[in-house]
Amino acid sequence: MTTWFTAADCDLDDFRAVCEQKTELSDYPHAADVVDNVLIYPGSLPDTREIQGELIRALRDGPGIVVFTGAFEPEVVDRATAVFASIIEEQKASGVRGGDHFAKPGANDRVWGALDKFALRDPAAFAAYYDNATLALICRAWLGLGYQVTSQVNVVNPGGQAQVAHRDYHLGFMSQEQALRYPAHIHALSPVLTLQGAVAHVDMPIETGPTLYLPHSQKYPAGYIAFHQPEFTSYFNEHHVQLPLKKGDAAFFNPALFHGAGTNRSSDVRRMANLLQVSSGFGRAMETVDRAAVVRALYPVLRDFGGSVENVIAASAEGYAFPTNLDRDQPIDGLAPPTQADLVRRAVAEKWEASRFEEALRSYETAHTG
């Protein structure tokens, strides 16, 4: 069994063999149809172990994506759309230019942290929207209990270009160099830590650029390395599928599935989707640690430390960029902003004065609070 992936492990022929499998409707008795290898389900299914098991198989061993037709009532979607549109207009009026993980900053309209903004602005509309049995069913199936919902609204305007094909959070938000530092079993773990979803807030015919998918690609073990390589991008561009959606339809997919938003070739449709990223409740440490206080206390020692500064930083500082407030800490210069550990590392290397380190640490803390 492979313990570490390398770029040499990414073989396009092997990838092709995985992606060119066929989705058989007979294997999924509760599905209504298969379209372009994607399973289509009705938006009202009972929450049973049998159906949960089928959805797990679909996301893990099958095409990696399911679409629920009519999952959200159009009237409920329209109430949420009005809230999101008002937030976007306020952002524009204030000069906010949204960054994006996999597209040019400013090309699309984004609402980062849309979950709490929605709840605070219109709690009744929020409750109506998230009182959704389909969402609860797929989240419980893939993640179990205690899952955590986050939401980012994405509007791809007419002329907005397609995203680069990618996998998603966690390892999908890393460069190839970063992903190579994680052992193979972490590559296998990452897809079961989150669930990706998209709720259509307008009708999305093909010309508006609904999301591009490569069914079955989530099963390629080295995919978090492969999606960075041009030959895999080319294969995706030639073989992806794209399904039109109606307002209220919802797609959910394994975060390891190769995908990307499509180009909006329409002249007048602002394609709005509520992108749901749902995380496992297990993605947390056992104890809370005031890491800012820890590194503040350690910094005078680390500036002239005779041992391994890196080992001490790893044991004390926050080494992961997320969660963060993406309004204040946008991914403009890369897939993820610098970590607290990066800040300490730089300060020690450049021998900052304590006052400069304190100011930078406070800025970091502000960016990582709600």
Image: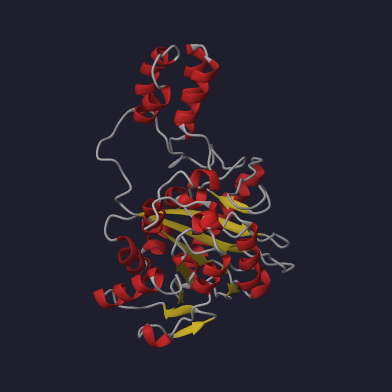
- Nearer to the camera, 81 or 358: 358
**In the image, residue 157 above or below residue 326:** below
* Apparent side of residue 45 relative to residue 156 in the rendered image (left or right): left
Image spot of residue 309 (x, y percent):
42, 22
Percent x, y of residue 132: 37, 67
Q: Is residue 59 visible?
A: yes
**Quarter of the image that includes the C terminus:** top left
For the residue pair 21 and 97, the one nearer the viewer reads as 21
Q: Position of residue 71 (x, y in %)?
A: 43, 73
Q: Is residue 365 above or below residue 159?
A: above
Q: Which quarter of the rendering shows the N terminus?
A: bottom left
Q: Nearer the viewer, residue 133 or 183?
A: 183
Left or right side of 195 for 271:
right
Q: Position of residue 355 (x, y in %)?
A: 49, 12
* Residue name at image x 40 percent, y 55 percent: 2
Q: Is residue 83 visible?
A: no
Q: Quadrant of residue 42?
A: bottom left
Q: How many numbered dots are placed on residues in this image? A: 0
* Residue at image coords 36%, 83%: 30
